[in-house]
Image (cartoon, rainbow, N blue to C red):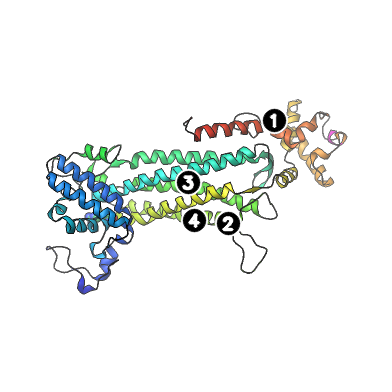
Amino acid sequence: MAENNDSDIKKWSGRFNEPVSALVERYTASIAFDYRLAEHDIQGSLAHAQMLAAQGIITQNDLSAIEQGLKQVGDEVRDGRFEWSLQLEDVHLNIEKRLTQLIGDAGKRLHTGRSRNDQVATDIRLYLRASIDEINHLMRSLQWAIVNLAENHTETVMPGFTHLQVAQPVTFGHHLMAYFEMFKRDTARLSDCRKRVNQLPLGAAALAGTSYPIDRERVARSLSFEGICENSLDAVSDRDFAIEFCACAALMMTHLSRLSEELIFWMNPAIGFVSLADRFCTGSSIMPQKKNPDVPELVRGKTGRINGHLIALLTLMKAQPLAYNKDNQEDKEPLFDTVDTVIDTLRVYADMLSGIQVNPEIMRNAALQGFATATDLADYLVKKGIPFRDAHEIVARSVRYAEHKACDLSDLALSELQQFSAAIEADVFSVLTLEGSLNSRSHPGGTAPEQVRAAVIGAKSWLSGEKHV
Ligand code: ARG
């Protein structure tokens, strides 16, 4: 990018006595990052110019020149030939200047009835709308990866944890489908946020609207916005749509971070439930035995910065009086980084889950430790007429006894179990097995294999677009 010495810098306009210093020029410029909005800026300018011509505000000849000039600018940007200038401050002024170089006075007429304030708000909304669509598309691939994995593990038993202590047996498929549900809500949230992103600010001009006979509905239609921002002051100033997006992204990353934490834990050699393909791990420069789960660790780590971006935008907005303030230029870097991080994370995640290796034997053995079926024994006693609190105490004592003998409840003889309650009969062993425990939880949302199979079928039809939630 072309940089300037103090002596090269021109003053902003005839209203000013002196130019800004080189430092102020660099400090106030946004071109180093907002060049990324170029494609959307051109898209918005085209729609604006077409409306100006349709309303007789500019001539058809001017419109044709603008269309042809913007096409050339777009080609130059795409091919990397466009020369961005720091002196021209931002993407809007860079493009307009180049357009004017190419087509003369018609280029200078493009900005009629418009301000950079409504222009930038439009650009960000167009950018964010496209980003949301890409994120939701990638999220779908990740959900497919989860459902496919869950489908292979509807009967794979693992210990379900509370407080990270063995609680009750669950199926690995059920565990995975919990994340499917979280991600389904994440995409629903984003789709809802998209409606508020998808409103047109153009026409608000600097803050109060414009005296030209513009047609905002026409611009909205040609840019596929669902409607127009109804108040010009609000249209140019608020960035709540970007904040809302960052909040959705923070929740999505939070869910991905939770799953990452589990993958890291499951991959610990002392646990060994899963292993990740080597391409998602790295070794240690000093400890030759190490295989580190770098990718999930970074997902967990990057969640912190996404949360930070949300706070940055909230803080950016909180004290701004109406209408536009330059503070808003600071919305872009957090927003861009949020989009980039979420997109990269989703891309790598779907691939990582598809390549995961699951160790059902190890999971099963872990479920056999820690008295995972103790609640089943309590429920068995309740069904024999014992009040739940008494049943709880009977089982607690049985567990202590089995713990001393270093065996599972299902390894105790019937006579040993009967020491704790005469209500225990030979049929108790069917509830003490892992499969007995799983199969007994057979209601919608439960962990029984048949329920997990049904959840997988429902998820697949939702993903195929047959069922919308
Ligand atoms: N680069 C500016 C931004 O990102 C564009 C709007 C400038 N408007 C102004 N009145 N200085 O917000």
**Circle 1 sits in a helix, a strand or a loop, which is it?**
helix
Tag 4 and tag 2, C-beta contact below 8 Å: no
The answer to whether residue 301 is magenta is: no
Q: Where is residue 145 in the image (x, y as percent from the top left)?
A: 55, 43
Q: Name the residue under label 2.
A: 279
In three-dimensional space, the C-alpha distance between marks 4 and 1, rounded to whole angstroms, equals 40 Å
Q: Name the residue under label 4.
A: 302
Q: Position of residue 4 (x, y in %)?
A: 25, 71
Relative to the observer, which residue lies in front, 424 or 434?
Answer: 434
Q: Where is residue 287 in the image (x, y as percent from the top left)?
A: 66, 67
Report the residue at 25% width, 66% height from top. Answer: 25
Amino acid bearing label 3: Leu
Q: Main secondary structure of the magenta part?
A: helix
Frontmost of labels 1 and 2 is 2
Disc number at residue 31? none
**Circle 4 sits in a helix, a strand or a loop, which is it?**
helix
Q: Which label's residue is closer to the chain start, 2 or 3?
A: 3
